[in-house]
Image (tube, grey):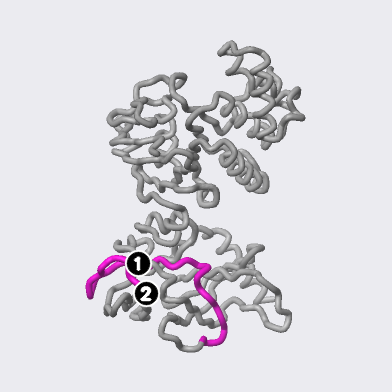
Amino acid sequence: MEDIRIEHLTKSFDGFIAVNDVNLTIHEGELFSFLGPSGCGKTTLLRMIAGFETPLTGKILLGNQDITQLPPYKRQVNTIFQNYSLFPHMTVYENVAFALKIKKLPQSEIDQRVKEMLQLVQMEDQANKYPGTLSGGQKQRVAIARALINKPRVLLLDEPLAALDLKLRQHMLIELMNIHDAVGITFIYVTHDQGEAISISDRLAVMNHGNIIQSGPADDIYERPDSIFSAYFIGETNLLPAEVVSLEDEYVGLKCDAGNGESFEIDSTYHFKPEIGQKLTVSLRPEKIAISRRRPREQEDINIVHGVIEDILYLGTHTQYIVKVGNLNFRVFSQHKRVYFDDAALDWEEPVWLFWHDTDSWLIDEVAPAELDAGDVNVFDVPIQMSRNLKRQSHQE
């Protein structure tokens, strides 16, 4: 069933278009996320669903009901904000019970429903405490219980975990998914954190400049981005400028310009009908690439390129290598599955081979902008520069 339907929704502030003609359907019981950088329009879109902002044009339907002009308290929608907005002078019990007391429900019913909600969020033993004595994660649970006590059809969550530390955020993501499964209502989640959106969402929408760039299941957007922006914003990727040189069955032959007159050829499966001579972009995720100081065995479905390690970053779960192939910088993630003490680790400035299966790259029908033509879409510019200086120093010593 269609729980939320957004039709041609537009919102502007003093001539600035914050949300631009958005059309979207969110299904009943779905955990749906809006993901994008700051200022992309995701929070404005959420606030219009909540009723805190009025659209310039378009409408919002909850089921078959047009709620576009309804005030927030008349919508079957509740919102959890980043700062929790708990009443500091009320206990946990009183915070959760507040909406029911406004409705003047019988005390016995209030007690029963508050007890159920506190059990759901595992806070029943904290009922008599005040918000000031709670941790960030506990405050978040109380906010969730308070938002759910009125049995809304839709729960809106605006960057709800932004104030928590990394481990607590990861724990609360699991708690949110469990709560969603338990109550079965629609959750709409706003975040700029790619990891949160990918891990928690049934589907998500990537936004930029007020537009929905791509929407769908998280794994579909990650593996099959529609645009350079989607590929670049969801996770990490290498963007390689390429030209189509051959077409055979489901494969396309590509020539990649590595700069300084250098080039290399790779194959990929194609997902739209390219033309010979067409310029486009290849998205290749760093974890799809294998790295070795030994050249791999030639295979028809394996792409092989040769380069030199520019930088190495140890990141705990994996090591990130920056490998220069001509003027292109390939980012490669090598997972730490097991430490082999008899196999020397790859070193800075060492020649290496990179190889990947031709189905692991994805063609995007766009030409990478000039600033990405070198393939350097690395978001760790400062740490890499630091690591390079430290590596140089260690070599000199």
Query: Which image quadrant: the N terminus?
Result: top left
Q: Is residue 265 above or below residue 57?
A: below
Residue at x 34%, y 37% (from the top left corner) = 19
Per the image, label 2 sits on a secondary structure element best described as: strand
In the rendered structure, the answer to whether residue 303 lies left or right of residue 395 reads left
- Using the rendered image of the protein, determine whether residue 243 is visible from the camera's viewpoint: yes
Looking at the rendered structure, the kind of residue marked 1 is: Leu
Q: Is residue 218 above or below residue 328?
A: above
Residue at x 60%, y 26% (from the top left corner) = 146
Q: Report if residue 271 lies within the magenta region.
A: yes
Looking at the rendered structure, the kind of residue marked 2 is: Ser
In the rendered picture of this protein, how many numbered marks are placed on residues?
2
143 or 115: which is nearer to us?
A: 115
- Labels 2 & 1 near each other (Cβ < 8 A): yes
Q: Is residue 101 above or below residue 30?
A: above
Q: Residues within 10 Å of mark 1 (few under 14, many from 20)?
A: many
Residue 189 percent location from the top left of the image: 50, 40
Report which residue position mark 2 lands on: 268
Residue 236 percent location from the top left of the image: 49, 60
Residue at x 49%, y 33% (from the top left corner) = 156
166 or 185: which is nearer to us?
A: 185
Q: Is residue 311 above or below residue 11?
A: below
Whole-number angstrom distance, CA of label 2 to CA of label 1: 8 Å
Residue at x 40%, y 66% (from the top left corner) = 283
Bounds of the magenta segment: 268-296
109 or 250: which is nearer to us?
A: 109
Q: Which quadrant of the figure has residue 371?
A: bottom left
Query: Which image quadrant: the C terminus?
Result: bottom right
Report which residue position mark 1 lands on: 363
